[in-house]
Each structure stands twice: as structure tokens, then as C-alpha cells.
Image: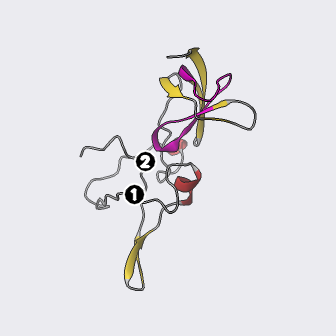
Amino acid sequence: MEISEKLLCLFSAEVTAEDDRYVVEVPRREIETGSIEPGDTYRVAVISGDAEPAEEQPTSEGPPSEPQPPVENGEIRYVEIEDIGKQGDGIARVERGYVIIVPGANVGDRVKVEVTEVKSNFAVGEIIEEDI
């Protein structure tokens, strides 16, 4: 199956009946991570839960229902700084709204970074090259 680069988030959900309609609930974490916004319209793809077996994930990585970070330690990324955090660090967003914190960067900077720390909801990147 081919997955579009426009994919903002991926999660499993149950379809529930509610009066004269059916509802698929979006997990709170997808809103909180900035992947999607309440009130906006999105295309939804529905894939059968038993059509393809899910890949087993190691238990040390967390529960299988949690999406894995889209970056790895040591990975090189080209990012654009979109915002400044509360402590003055640059903030870039990549797949699914995942945040990379870039100390020493300013809004609008396009930089090449090496990911030095990866957490479930953010990563830290060190600037390797500025103004790319």
C-alpha cells in the first residue's frame, strides 16, 4: 500500500454509532501535537483492522498504539524554524506535527540539523549548517 506524503497522523480507532451517524474519534494526542486542528476538514482513509497484520513493536519502545517518532538519533534533517519556544529555542515541525527543538535558531531560519535527542513527543537537533 502506498502512503501519501500528505499523511498528518496515523492511529487506530473504533467506529461508534451515535444517533443517525457513525463516529470515528480522533485521539487527543493528535490535536495536542499539532498534527490536526479541530474544525478543519480532512480526508480519511479507512483500512480494515484485520486486512494486514500489524508489525510487532518492541515493548521497550512503549505501547504499540503509540506512534513512533519520525526521527532517529543521529539523523540529519533540513528544517525551517517556525516558532520560538518559551526558553528561546527554535522550533521546527516535521511529519505529523512532530517538534524538533533547535537551540540557537530564529524564526525563518532554514538549517541543517543533526538529531541529538529523541523523545516520544519531541526531539532536539544541533545546527550543522545555517542558511540552506
The residue range painted magenta reads 91-114
The correct choice, above or below, for 20 with respect to 28 in the image is below
- SS type, badge 2: loop
The percent coordinates of residue 34 (x first, y second) are: 55, 49
Q: Which of marks 1 and 2 is nearer the N terminus?
A: 2
Q: Residue furthest top?
A: 129
Tell which residue pokes out farthest to the front in this image.
108
Residue positioned 47% across, 51% down in the render: 64
| Marks 1 and 2 in Cβ contact (< 8 Å) | yes
Q: Which secondary structure, mark 1?
A: loop
Task: Give the mark count.
Answer: 2
Residue bearing the label numbered 2: 8
Q: Which mark is residue 42?
A: 1
Q: In which quarter of the image is residue 17?
A: bottom left
Q: Does the magenta stretch include residue 52?
A: no
Mark 2 nearby-residue class (10 Å; few <14, some 14–19, many ≥20): some
Q: How is the rendered protein coloured?
A: secondary structure
* Spot occupied by residue 39 in the image (x, y as percentages of width and height): 50, 63
